[in-house]
Amino acid sequence: MDPNVSIDDKGESRLYIGNLDFRITEAALLKMFSPYGKIISEDFLWHTRGPKRGEPRGFAFIQYSSKEEAELAKEKMHGRLACGRPLVVRLAGEKCMLETADNSAKAVSEVHKMHLTSGGGGGAMGQTSRSAKIAAIKNKLKSLEEESSRTKKQKQSENIS
C-alpha cells in the first residue's frame, strides 16, 4: 500500500469488469488486460455460499498502477467479445445503474457496428439503444440455450455410465 496514493486516486485506476463468461479464468482475465498497463491487484469474485458456491460470479476488479492505464484498458476492452459476450468495463467508481445499462447497450451496439464509429452518437441514440438492447437479449438467450444443451448432454452421459 502506497501511503502517497489517496482513496480517490485508487478509484480512478480501478476497473470493474462485468458480463464475464463463466469459462473465463483469473489467468485469462489478467492476460487480456495486462497489455494496457501494470496491474497491481486483481479481485476475481466467486460465490461463497449457496448452490453456486465456488463458481465465478461473472465480474471482477482490476487495479492498474495509473489512471491513464485504466482509462486505456477501459477504452480498448469495453464491448470487446470474450467467449461470445461483450465485456462491460468501467471505472469502479462509476456506480450509476442507468449509466451501466446505457454502457451495456452501447457496448453491444459498438460490437455490431464492428467499431467503425467512435463513441456514442446524437439523435438516433434512442433507436440504437433499443436495437442494442434487443441484440443483448438475443445474445443472452443464445448463451442460456447453449448452457441448457450442455447440461442435458452431461446428464445423458451420466445416465448412460
Image (spheres, helix red, strand yellow):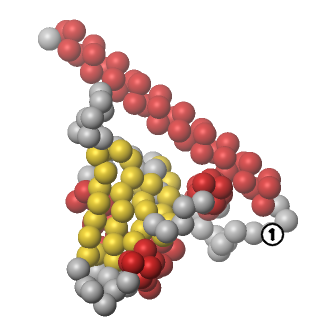
User: Of the residues shown, which amino acid type is indicated by label 1?
Assistant: Gly
Q: Is residue 53 above or below residue 96?
A: above
Question: Farthest left residue?
Answer: 161
Residue 80 lies, in percent from the top left, at: 48, 61
The residue depicted at 47 percent of the width and 36 percent of the height is 143
Quadrant containing the C terminus in the rendered view: top left
Looking at the picture, how far across and down is residue 148, in whole percent? 41, 25
What is the quadrant of the N terminus in the image? bottom left
Can you name the residue that lies furthest to the right here?
123
- 88 or 50: which is nearer to us? 50
Q: Residue at x 33, y 23 (%)?
A: 151
Q: Secondary structure at mark 1?
A: loop
Q: Which residue is mark 1?
A: 122
In the drawing, does residue 26 fall left or right of residue 149?
left
State left or right for residue 86 relative to residue 52: right
Residue 76 visible to the viewer: no
Say if 94 sits above or below 2 in the image.
Answer: above
